Amino acid sequence: MRRVRLAVAALLTVSPLLHAATSFVVPTTTLAAQTTNNTSAAATFTTQNNGNRGAGNISKVDVHSLLYAGASTKVYAHLLLWFGPANHMNVGYTSDDPVQVHNQITDMISRGIDGVIIDWYGPNNAIDDATKLVMAEAEQHPGFTFAVMVDQGAIQSDSCSGCTPQQALIAQMQYVEQTYFTSPAYLTRNGQPVVTNFDIDLVYTIDWSAVNAALSTHPLFLFENNGGFTHTVSGGAYSWVMPTTTDFGMSYLTSFYDTGALVPAEMTVGATYKGFNDTLAAWGSNRIMTQQCGQTWLQTFSEINGLYNSGKQLTDLQLVTWNDYEEASEIESGIDNCVTLAATVAGSALQWTIQGDESTIDHYTVYISTDGQNLMPLTNVAAGGHGLDLCSLNIPTANYQLFAQAVGKPTLANQMSAAITYTPSCNSNIIPPTVALGAAPTTLTIPAGQSAAVTVTALTQSGSLNTPIALSCAGIPSALSCIFSPAMITPGSGAATSLLTISARANRVTSPAGPPRRLLPIRLSWLLPIGFAGFVFAGSLPRRRRVQAIALFVLMVVGMSTISCGGNTFASPNALEPVASVAVPVGRIAPVVANYAVTIQGNYGSSQLSTTVTVAVR
């Protein structure tokens, strides 16, 4: 009887805790879903020594987030459909399997990819059968498109009996026109279906005008590299990975984008890639471009972001490649960022440490669980933050397991910490920590067009703050810009700092030299009708009045010339466009253009800190 009473007492003690936990934790995912293969790569695919990552858990953050703010770029994956037969590497799946095609297209969509470009090898073969499956699958997803790249191997492997390469290509393009152009999911630009090709001109001599003339629907032909922009019947060009370069292809990409900018009417299809390694390919020649733990992938996006913006868009981008496992440019299985994560709990503070390059991390997600398998996300923490004050989340008292996950930037690997046991012991009577935000220096003088640095410090004066503080500049004027590095700091029981860079825009004032000289004839042309009319009018007056009138017109002409051409009175027709800045003689101090009070804010939970820096722009 005594044992029964003890058991009942224990049950009465545990039940409220269990109820509180189960009512608070509403799982939306599982540990398995966040740690096992979430890609269309075969679950049996293992890491290879050419750099391909084995099937695992990767970031599904939208790939467009790696592009500049306001990008409207369409992103396409380059897809190979030749896996399964013995003449290619075994990657664990067959390309003409409808289930596999469905998995690949839905995986692409989950990463934010807009369409697919298929490396096509002619009609009536396994690759063509798989292409038809891709077409059918794409049609099930409105907005997702596909296009055909005719590989030079198509002419060699599918030439009609006695046909010339020219005739074979025409027959193949007519087949593409009849079979694929009619699909509502086929990629078009201004009503024209888009067709690319791979190395055809490198192997064969083709009259592309004749190919185009043989089609009822005239496509937009895209060709390779810089020369593609000036190719016969060219509608644009696409770039590719260049594994033999010594700078990871950056100078090649810069040259390609610069060339494309000269022909804005044509399509410029950029390229991003993780690297290249053909040492496992049967045809390989030991060409290697290392992945740099994800940095090669990120650099190819940075190259785009340095040349394009919301006002100058890169319209199209091709990911090289979705699944070329043999040349190790595939991103289907994800990209290894060489990151590991460890987390601990001390009191109410959850903290984690990361080994590896944090620039590959998009954000952190903290999960809570009652059984260690079914998870509910508690909150997200921006990259740069390494802790969380659990008492700020009002978690009911019970026994839990916590997990911290480093979510990679798009297509990079995710990393999950081991489970951490946690039982809340928060007391509402506990005095919250006292934190002060400061800046040094507090006054700055910045020449127009230049930058200056401020050290921002969050100092815990009492207690311990383990919640990241998000830093920002409040109400900053358009003449200035702010960048924090890092943007989130966690002072704990001590201090944490961030480097704030404040930049001043260049002055929009006129050079003493005045407006461009080409404007002078335009200004003077305004005076001709006035002068002509004036002399006609003066001719009808008596001689004395005529002299007075002519003198008056001369004064008007001189005055209007001064207004039109004088350096200090000319106004830029567009206030956002820079005009030559005022030169300041050596030894003299530039005049103060404006003074600004920049408020630096630090937000954590429902609390807000602030400090002010005074900026003088000269």
Image (cartoon, rainbow, N blue to C red):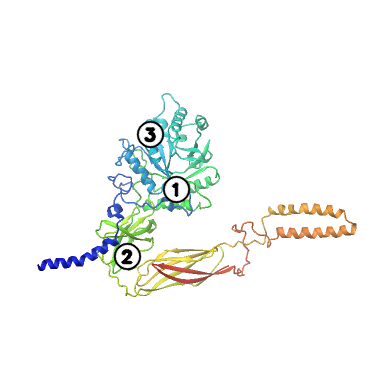
Identity, as a three-letter code, of the amino acid under mark 3 = Asp
Check disc 2 and report the residue beneath it.
351
The residue tagged with tag 1: helix, strand or loop? loop
- Contact? badges 2 and 1 (CB < 8 Å): no
Residues packed near mark 2 inside 10 Å, few (<14), some (14 to 19) or many (20 plus): some
Identity, as a three-letter code, of the amino acid under mark 2 = Gln
- Contact? badges 3 and 1 (CB < 8 Å): no
Residues packed near mark 1 inside 10 Å, few (<14), some (14 to 19) or many (20 plus): many
Compared with residue 7, is residue 173 higher up or lower down, i.e. above or below?
above
Check disc 1 and report the residue beneath it.
249
The residue tagged with tag 3: helix, strand or loop? helix
Q: Measuring 37% from the left and 70% from the top, which residue is drawn there?
A: 491
Q: x%, y% of residue 573?
A: 64, 56
Front in this rendered view, residue 448 or 382: 382
Residues packed near mark 3 inside 10 Å, few (<14), some (14 to 19) or many (20 plus): some
Query: What separation in Å lies between label 3 and label 1 (alpha carbons)?
Result: 32 Å
Query: What separation in Å lies between label 3 and label 2 (alpha carbons)?
Result: 52 Å
Residue 125: quadrant of the picture: top left
Mark toward the viewer: 3 or 1 = 3
Q: Earlier in the sequence, mark 3 or mark 2?
A: 3
Residue 289 visible (yes or no): no
Residue 301 visible (yes or no): yes
